[in-house]
Image: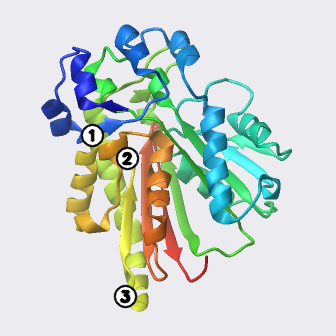
């Protein structure tokens, strides 16, 4: 675990107070050994790749097995694998193919990478597709600390590692039902958030934060009316999940959109920015709190610049 004290000890000009004031993050997880970060600050990306304790394939496999168990399914029930995120380990093959191989399944598999908005983009694409198999595995292995320079205080404080997995179906009803999705982008901002093929993560922090607040608020306000109307009839509640990159951004969005803090679910304080895995991990962590009649509005933003949103209605069922 990388807490703020650990980052202070790296002597890169940061403090717990400085970090909390700017991003509100206290802790992050990493696949990199802490001694490796202390001694090298991850200056050599190839060395970081070799030093990592877990690969994207392994964390993807483990997350998939958790999702399968929760759904009461076996790997052999999966008919397609879709993966994606911010920092794939290889140019080819697709990480979806490698994860499918690790699970022992022979099915169509492909990557859809849209940075931190990948989960939203994946579900939006799947919702538009015909002829899908009965069950599709969507997995986002985000071990992006491998691309972080721990000599740069502006970016070292942001990232944590995490992997999400979800099983979706257009045939089998579930209690969590995606009823609306959106996807959009502004390619004019393509240079604002970057992980070069042979370089560390960089971003235009101020511009990206303004974009994240404005865009997340717009996504939320577009889907809130329908969610509010539904819960008025069902007696349920609306919950909002945003991109888990910065606590201050989430607070600003909630304030501007008139969302109560108790209506927003988040984990950025304990896990940092886990990229495309962040929002679906929050959903997973609150799975047992989802009751029939509730609605969840999820909005994510990412490099590209891209953004996506969805409304998930909770019905009776398992």
- Disc sitting over residue 275 in the figure: none
Viewer-side residue, 43 vs 130: 43
- Disc sitting over residue 244 in the figure: 2
Decide: is 78 above or below 306.
below
Viewer-side residue, 81 vs 227: 81
Residue at (26%, 23%) from the top-left corner? 7
- Label 3 element class: helix
Label 1 sits on residue: 25
Side of 118 where 77 appears, left or right: right
Report the label total. 3
The quarter in which the N terminus is drawn is top left
Asked if the residue under mark 3 is in contact with the one under mark 2, i.e. CB atoms within 8 Å, the reply is: no
Marks 2 and 1, the one that precedes in the sequence: 1
Viewer-side residue, 181 vs 59: 59
Label 3 sits on residue: 232
Decide: is 72 above or below 294.
above
- Label 2 element class: loop
Marks 1 and 3, the one that precedes in the sequence: 1
| Residue 304 appears in the picture as rendered | yes
Q: In which quarter of the image is residue 97?
A: top right
Side of 81 where 125 appears, left or right: left
Alpha carbon separation for disc pair 1 and 3? 34 Å
Q: From the image, state whether disc 2 or disc 1 is nearer to you.
A: 1
Residue 90 percent across, percent down from the top left: 66, 23
Residue at (26%, 39%) from the top-left corner? 26
Q: From the image, state whether disc 1 or disc 3 is nearer to you.
A: 1
Asked if the residue under mark 3 is in contact with the one under mark 1, i.e. CB atoms within 8 Å, the reply is: no
């Amino acid at each position: 675990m990388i807490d703020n004290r650990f980052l202070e000890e790296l002597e890169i000009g940061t403090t717990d107070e400085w970090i909390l004031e700017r991003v509100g993050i206290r802790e992050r997880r990493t696949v990199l050994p802490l001694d490796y970060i202390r001694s090298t600050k991850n200056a050599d990306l190839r060395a970081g790749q070799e030093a990592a304790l877990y690969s994207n394939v392994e964390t993807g496999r483990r997350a998939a097995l958790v999702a399968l168990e929760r759904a009461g399914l076996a790997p052999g029930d999966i008919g397609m694998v879709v993966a994606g995120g911010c920092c794939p380990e290889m140019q080819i093959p697709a990480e979806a193919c490698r994860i499918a191989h690790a699970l022992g399944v022979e099915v169509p598999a492909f990557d859809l990478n849209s940075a931190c908005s990948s989960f939203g983009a994946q579900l939006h694409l799947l919702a538009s597709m015909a002829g899908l198999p009965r069950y599709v595995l969507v997995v986002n292995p985000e071990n992006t600390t491998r691309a972080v320079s721990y000599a740069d205080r502006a970016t070292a404080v942001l990232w944590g590692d995490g992997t999400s997995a979800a099983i979706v179906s257009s045939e089998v009803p579930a209690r969590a039902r995606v009823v609306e999705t959106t996807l959009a982008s502004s390619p004019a901002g393509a240079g604002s958030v970057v992980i070069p093929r042979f370089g560390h993560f960089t971003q235009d922090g101020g511009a990206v934060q303004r974009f994240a607040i404005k865009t997340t608020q717009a996504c939320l306000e577009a889907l809130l009316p329908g969610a509010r109307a539904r819960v008025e009839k069902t007696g349920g509640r609306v919950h909002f999940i945003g991109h888990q990159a910065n606590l201050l951004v989430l607070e600003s969005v909630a304030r501007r959109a008139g969302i109560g803090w108790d209506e927003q679910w988040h984990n950025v304080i304990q896990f940092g920015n886990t990229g495309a895995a962040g929002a679906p991990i929050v959903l997973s962590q609150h799975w047992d709190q989802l009751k029939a009649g509730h609605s969840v509005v999820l909005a994510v933003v990412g490099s590209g610049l891209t953004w996506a949103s969805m409304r998930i209605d909770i019905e009776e069922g398992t």
